[in-house]
Image (cartoon, rainbow, N blue to C red):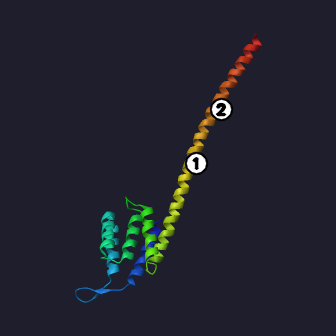
Amino acid sequence: MKISIRCAILIAVVLISACSSTTDKSGAPVDKRALAFERTQALLSQRQYEVAYNESQRALQDGSADPDLALFNLGMISAHSANPKKNYGRGLSYFRMLVKDYPNSQLVEPAKTWIQVLEEYHKISEEKRLLAKEREDLMAEKEKLKYANEKSRQVDVEIEKRRRETLRK
């Protein structure tokens, strides 16, 4: 999962570096998308997931960042493996929204990669849950069979005891 995260981040950085720029106070070009992405990455590296999420959410709502980038960042923050409040389903929905609403965005391909990773994770988690339930059911069945076997032994002992008593008479 960490390799996928690093790949998605690398792809996003490369794509963002190709985006349009504005200028700073000195007239030098400044890439707003790259700055927004770097800010989010800095917050993530500092483990400030909630701050990064809130900033990206605010940027999406007030339009201070490109909406596709804000959605991508929200997806990354939601799906970040070290985020204690991670929510893979929410991250998946952000990536899907990005792909659906901004099909020409340069972030669509990394978002599609994230979608595949998160869907595969969901599939594996569901299989794991089903296997755990099946294991519980099998353990319960094993206990029932163990109980039935013990009762059967008790009945066999009782039958043998009665047979011996009958033979003595």
> Within the image, what quadrant is residue 36 found in?
bottom left
Residue wearing tag 1: 134
Tell me: 33 left or right of 116.
left
Q: Which residue is mark 2?
A: 149
Farthest residue toward the bottom? 27
Percent across and percent down for residue 19 are 38, 84
Residue 41, picture quadrant: bottom left
Residue 47 visible, this angle? no
Left or right: 106, with 43 as reference point:
right
Task: Count how many numbered circles sit on residues in the image.
Answer: 2
Give percent across and percent down for residue 110. 46, 75
Residue drawn at x 67%, y 28% as measured from the top left? 153
Work out whether residue 130 or residue 167 is closer to the camera in this orientation and state it: 130
**Residue occupying image coordinates x 62% and y 35%:** 146
Residue at disc 1, secondary structure: helix
Q: Residues within 10 Å of mark 1 (few under 14, many from 20)?
A: few
Q: Tag 2: residue type?
A: Asn
* Mark earlier in primary sequence (2, 1): 1
